Image (tube, helix red, strand yellow):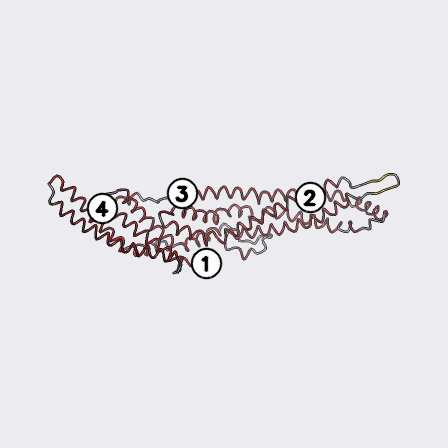
């Protein structure tokens, strides 16, 4: 296995490790922010809730794309064949 | 196309390509997610763009072998199928338009070599005859003195023909490089570099260069060589003229120059045979070959180079830039 191949595989493995952690952090942080939003006055609550929902959606999107990365690659590689 | 076949199967090159694509997809996912979380529109759009590019790159890598073989097949339909007379090994080189061009250039090169050889011999005869001098008591005569200028002209023609020999050798080397490097090496390399956003522009440029040099550059040549090369007729005519001239007069420099009578007989014989007229016919046959060579080896490559450069610049912009889909932003 060539050096470049090993290097790329290491980067891929690192991203596969970082991605889910980031996803979980965003989802948990989203939950915390959503919980905190309930303690805020009515005029600010909407902002906090929006930020929380954004974090949760972001976390879910990261998880979905990382989980389906190989599938996306395999499916798209057959588009022209 | 061995590298391309290799790229379409499980190999080191293929693994590198798919790993880069997977990395690109993961990075795009992180960019979209983080962009949504911190409400950064720019980061989110960057992630979307990367995701689209990853899908396109993956499709291109998956279909690389089919794309190149289809492109090559389309190109071959524009290449003449009938063997050209000057092309020594046309059957072995019909696998690509660039191969057809290389083959014809090799034909021109070998034709040029034989013409150069014949012309050197003819010039030797003409230069010898122009220097023949008869000494008769108090006067001396040099009957073919005017041919000295012809010998000098042929020398200058020979220099030009050697220049064209170098030029044709250069073009053969260039075409051989295109055949061995454009599709088998540059195209896969460009595609791998295009997978990653940091090297997308250079990857697109390398891909455009590979396609431009392999597809567009040889096309003008196929027009110049179709149905027969421009140089073929003029080379043949000059070769025939030179061969007949050399066959008739190559023995002239072998006369015994110590014998005044033999020299006189030779001069009479040359005058009766219209030696000057034949030299003139020989001289007339050279310029058409030189102009044909200049057309095929200078004008055509220049036009091809300009068209290829324009094509490469346009294609590099297309391949190196982001390909946007308007409707994707709505998702």
> Of marks 3 and 4, which one's residue comes earlier in the chain?
4
Q: Secondary structure at mark 1?
A: helix
Q: Nearer the viewer, residue B96 or B124?
A: B124
> Of marks 1 and 4, which one's residue comes earlier in the chain?
1
Disc 1 or disc 4, which is closer to the eye?
A: 4
Please report the residue visible at 43 percent of the width from the left and 48 percent of the height from the top: B206
> Of marks 4 and 2, which one's residue comes earlier in the chain?
4
> Of marks 1 and 2, which one's residue comes earlier in the chain?
1
Instruction: Name the chain letter of the residue that bears numbered label 2.
Output: B
Badge 3 density bin: few <14, some 14–19, many ≥20, Cα 10 Å: some
Badge 1 density bin: few <14, some 14–19, many ≥20, Cα 10 Å: few
Tag 4 and tag 2, C-beta contact below 8 Å = no
Same chain for labels 4 and 2? Say yes or no: yes
- How far across and how far down the image is residue A19, in percent? 26, 53
> Of marks 2 and 3, which one's residue comes earlier in the chain?
2
Tag 2 and tag 3, C-beta contact below 8 Å = no
Drawn side of residue B286 relative to residue B53, left or right: right
Instruction: Find disc 2 in the rendering and name its residue.
Output: B155
Same chain for labels 1 and 4? Say yes or no: yes
Q: Secondary structure at mark 2?
A: helix
Query: In whole angstroms, how far apart are the C-alphas of marks 1 and 2?
Result: 47 Å
Query: In whole angstroms, how far apart are the C-alphas of marks 1 and 3?
Result: 28 Å
Please report the residue visible at 87 percent of the width from the left and 41 percent of the height from the top: B136
Q: Nearer the viewer, residue B208 or A51?
A: A51
The tag on residue B2 is 1
Instruction: Find disc 4 in the rendering and name its residue.
Output: B37
Instruction: Find disc 3 in the rendering and name its residue.
Output: B317
Drawn side of residue B69 relative to residue B48, left or right: right
Please report the residue visible at 45 percent of the width from the left and 53 percent of the height from the top: B185
Q: Secondary structure at mark 3?
A: helix
Query: In whole angstroms, how far apart are the C-alphas of marks 4 and 2?
Result: 80 Å
């Amino acid at each position: 296995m060539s050096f470049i191949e090993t290097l790329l595989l290491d980067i891929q493995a690192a991203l596969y490790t970082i991605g889910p952690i980031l996803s979980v952090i965003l989802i948990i942080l989203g939950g915390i922010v959503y919980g905190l939003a309930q303690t805020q006055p009515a005029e600010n609550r909407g902002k906090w809730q929006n930020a929380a929902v954004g974090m949760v959606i972001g976390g879910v999107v990261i998880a979905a794309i990382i989980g389906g990365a190989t599938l996306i690659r395999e499916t798209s590689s057959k588009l022209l064949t | 196309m061995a590298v391309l076949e290799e790229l379409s199967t499980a190999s080191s090159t293929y693994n590198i390509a798919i790993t880069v694509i997977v990395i690109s997809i993961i990075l795009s996912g992180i960019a979209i997610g983080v962009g949504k979380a911190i409400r950064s529109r720019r980061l989110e759009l960057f992630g979307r763009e990367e995701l689209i590019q990853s899908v396109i790159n993956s499709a291109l890598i998956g279909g690389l072998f089919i794309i190149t073989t289809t492109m090559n097949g389309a190109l071959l339909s524009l290449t003449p199928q009938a063997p050209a007379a000057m092309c020594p090994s046309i059957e072995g080189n019909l696998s690509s338009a660039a191969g057809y061009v290389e083959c014809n250039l090799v034909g021109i090169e070998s034709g040029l070599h034989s013409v150069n050889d014949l012309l050197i011999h003819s010039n030797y005869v003409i230069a010898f005859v122009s220097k023949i001098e008869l000494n008769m008591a108090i006067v001396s005569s040099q009957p073919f003195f005017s041919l000295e200028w012809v010998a000098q002209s042929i020398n200058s023609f020979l220099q030009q023909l050697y220049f064209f020999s170098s030029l044709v050798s250069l073009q053969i080397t260039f075409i051989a490089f295109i055949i061995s490097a454009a599709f088998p090496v540059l195209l896969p390399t460009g595609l791998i570099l295009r997978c990653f956003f940091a090297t997308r522009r250079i990857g697109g440029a390398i891909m455009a260069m590979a396609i431009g040099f392999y597809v567009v550059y040889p096309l003008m040549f196929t027009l110049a060589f179709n149905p027969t090369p421009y140089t073929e007729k003029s080379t043949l005519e000059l070769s025939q003229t030179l061969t007949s001239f050399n066959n008739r007069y190559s023995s002239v420099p072998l006369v015994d120059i110590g014998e005044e009578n033999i020299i006189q007989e030779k001069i009479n014989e040359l005058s009766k045979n219209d030696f000057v007229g034949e030299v003139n016919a020989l001289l007339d046959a050279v310029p058409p070959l030189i102009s044909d060579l200049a057309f095929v080896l200078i004008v055509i490559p220049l036009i091809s180079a300009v068209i290829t450069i324009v094509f490469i610049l346009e294609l590099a912009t297309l391949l190196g830039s982001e390909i946007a889909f308007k409707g994707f932003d709505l998702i």
